[in-house]
Amino acid sequence: MKKLILSIAFFVAITGATFAQKKTAEERATKSTEMMVTNLSLSVDQKSIIYNAAVEKNKASDALKEAAGEGNKPDADQMKAINQKYSKILKETLNDDQKAKLAEINAAAKAAKDAQKPKTGDAN
């Protein structure tokens, strides 16, 4: 359990660092793939497939963001399509145990992210 929590904290830290620095699509893909190798025990074939899919996803997302212009949001439907394509590749590549563990990691990362958000609401 401790290892899972540390892995999640590490993933959240890497994700934050990725947004803070302008890393290449390949660098971001390497980091996310290595996180999966560590936490999901990917095979060599799985690692290659997921890395290539992550590079493609990152490049497509970067192109949409660049086309939208600084300060503007890229087209949500196109971003959703990119993410769905990547998710489909993950689902086809990972086995059931790996999918379950990835879902746990994602849920914990989302909970950690939500916990960092300031609470909004009436002060009355």
Image (cartoon, rainbow, N blue to C red):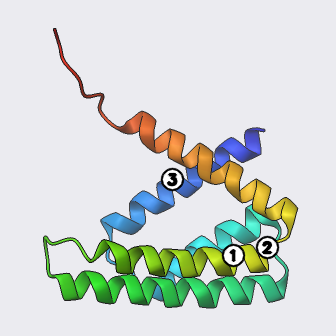
Task: Quickly name the residue at label 2.
Answer: 94
Disc marking residue 90: 1
Q: Amino acid at mark 1?
A: Leu
Asked whether disc 3 touches disc 2, contact meaning CB atoms under 8 Å apart, the reply is no
Query: At which x and y percent is residue 5?
Result: 67, 42
Residue bearing mark 3: 12
Query: 118 or 38, which lies in front?
Result: 118
Residue at 18% across, 82% down:
68
Amino acid carrying label 3: it is Val
Q: CA distance from mark 3 to mark 1?
A: 20 Å
Tell me the quarter of the picture where residue 75 sits.
Answer: bottom left
Q: Quadrant of residue 24?
A: bottom left
Whether residue 24 can be seen here: no
Q: Nearer the viewer, residue 22 or 106?
A: 106
Q: Quarter of the image containing the N terminus?
A: top right
Q: Secondary structure at mark 2?
A: loop
